[in-house]
Image (cartoon, grey):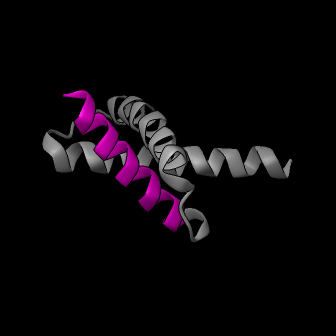
């Protein structure tokens, strides 16, 4: 997947996850960062479950799931 596609998926996934978890985004760079890290985490979690998602939509769903999990972990660490 190209670098531009990573940025687009990361930005979208971070923005969507931010809206799901706390009602707002994190700015363009924050959204991209959360989305890209979420994509890696989502890919890892999906592989543990034996799931595979291909294409743009599959990559976006994987990144969103990972970003939501990432934001949930961050919220638990911050509140502890």
Q: Judge by depth and name the residue closer to the eye, 54 or 26.
A: 26
| Residue 51, visible in the rendered structure | no
Characterize the magenta stretch by its predominant secondary structure: helix
- Left or right, 40 with respect to 54, comes to right
What is the count of numbered marks? 0
Identify the residue at horizontal 17%, vertical 45% (top origin): 56
Residue drawn 77% across and 43% down?
Answer: 77
Q: Magenta stretch containing residue 79, yes or no? A: no
Check the image and name the residue furthest to the bottom. 23
- Residue at the left extreme of this rendering: 55
Whether residue 56 is visible:
yes
Name which residue lies at 42% across and 36% down: 36
* Vertical relation: 6 (above or below) 71: above
Q: Does 56 sit left or right of 4 as displayed?
A: left
List x then y, in percent, for residue 7: 33, 39
Most extreme residue toward the right, as rendered? 80
Closest to the observer, 50 or 45: 45
Residue 32 image position (x, y, % from top left): 44, 43
* Residues in magenta, as a range: 1-20
Looking at the image, is 74 positioned above or below residue 19?
above
Q: Position of residue 18 (x, y in %)?
A: 53, 60
Viewport quadrant of the N terminus: top left
Q: Position of residue 5 (x, y in %)?
A: 23, 38
Q: Which of the 4 image quadrants contains residue 6?
A: top left
């Amino acid at each position: 997947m190209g670098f531009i596609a990573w940025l687009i998926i990361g930005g979208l996934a971070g923005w969507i996850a931010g809206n799901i978890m706390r009602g707002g985004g994190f700015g363009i760079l924050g959204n991209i960062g959360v989305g890209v890290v979420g994509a890696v985490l989502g890919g890892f979690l999906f592989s543990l479950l034996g799931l595979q998602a291909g294409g743009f939509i599959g990559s976006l769903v994987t990144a969103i799931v990972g970003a939501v999990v990432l934001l949930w972990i961050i919220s638990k660490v911050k509140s502890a």
